[in-house]
Amino acid sequence: MAPFTDGFSRELETRGYAPGSVALQLQLMAQLSRWLEDQRLGVSGLTRLRVEEFFQARRARVRALQVSPTCLRVLFGHLGDVGVLPAEELTRPGPVELLVGAFGRFLLQERALEVRTVQRYQYVAGRFLAACAASDVAVAGIGVVTITAFMTAECKASSNGWSQCVATALRSLLRYLYLEQMISTSLAGSVPAVAGWRAASLPKALTAAELASLLAACSGQSNAARRDYAVLLMAGRLGLRAGEIAGLGLRSINWEQGELRVLGKGRRVDLLPVPVDVGRALATYVRHGRVAAGDALFQHLHAPHGRLAPASVTGIVYRACDRAGLPRVGAHRLRHTAATQMLRAGASLPEIAQVLRHRSPDTTALYAKVDRRALAELARPWPAGAA
């Protein structure tokens, strides 16, 4: 692999790898090169099977570092770009995979669902279609018995929330199959409903002291502290979802107008005002905390740099909870916190709905149950002398 060392080293530096990390990657490349030579193989013999054999040999020597094939993802990308990797034979997708793929593209393009939602729906669709195939039931022969049997088996040991997701995903699949004329009858209404009581619980939110502790846990002058503090403010003050925070770019911020352009659910675009404290935290992070170029606002601090995933945003909240000595909560708990604080400050439910960008007033009405001052005006006095 000696001819590719210089090019790979330059790519690592371009991706923002520190000198020490570049040295480790080049060391791994040299070890792989020697292993290929011992096996009397060239770079063209570097198949997935050979890579697994290489790492099995490393694990057998009890190496503590770089014992997973994921360590080679950047090297493989570089070798693929220069066209020296073997053209391995790809597995041809079967009928179920093709149908699930078409279903996912429909959800993305026609329904404008979020990627994570599409992935969940595709997972359920794949399990349902695989169950049909195992029972020798063709797509055109899907009926109520097949649907009920799948729902019973799938939800038998599942939580109420996941069972409702399965039911929703299955209805969506059946509507798609009917739309594409793969089934002759609309069967979406045949999916059994999952018992659930909407708005039966109170929205859980952090107290003002807990939120202050969470933010204080991210105070500091490091790049990580500046980034994490801005992320927490975006969730706790503006009520942004984890996916919305991850999707922000530099061009999402209008500094002159003090506005934030948010791409929400269903590809809905909204403009939100940026409070002074949020704007100050963003400006500090952009000027002194971002470590790489590109439009992505919140990025990974270590190479390879790139946009944060929604799960990474949740991880930031988890780690802040650990440092603050609080039980772990997700980013959505901070969204509830923002709504609750606005309510306690005197904001009306329609105003909260505008900030949280709810499509239905029923969603915002959940917070009416924590408005104790308004509820106290509706409460009737306790009858005198009642036991």
Image (tube, grey):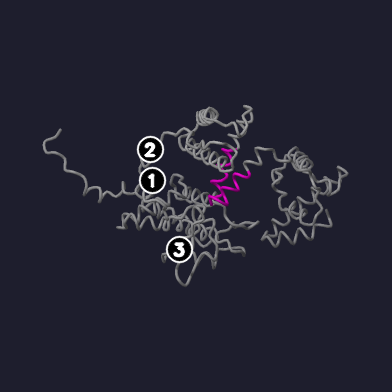
What secondary structure is marked by label 3?
A: strand
Nearer the N terminus, badge 1 or badge 2? 2
Nearer the N terminus, badge 2 or badge 3? 2
| Residue where numbered disc 1 is placed | 204
What secondary structure is marked by label 2?
A: loop
Q: Position of residue 99 (x, y in %)?
A: 63, 41
Viewer-proximal residue, 383 or 75?
A: 383
| Residue where numbered disc 2 is placed | 197
Question: What amino acid is at disc 3?
Answer: Leu
Q: Residue 48 colored magenta? A: no
Does residue 322 lie above or below 128 as drawn? Answer: below
| Residue where numbered disc 3 is placed | 271
Q: Quadrant of residue 150?
A: top right
Q: Which residues are magenta?
A: 101-125
Nearer the N terminus, badge 1 or badge 3? 1
Q: Main secondary structure of the magenta part?
A: helix
Q: Is residue 63 left or right of residue 175?
A: right
| Residue at 54% in and 38% down | 174
- Whole-angstrom CA distance, mark 1 to mark 2, is 17 Å
Q: Position of residue 82 (x, y in %)?
A: 79, 57
Q: Residue 108 colored magenta? A: yes
Question: What amino acid is at disc 1?
Answer: Lys
- Whole-angstrom CA distance, mark 1 to mark 3, is 26 Å
Question: What amino acid is at disc 2?
Answer: Trp
Does residue 177 lie above or below 7 as drawn? Answer: above
| Residue at 70% in and 60% down | 19
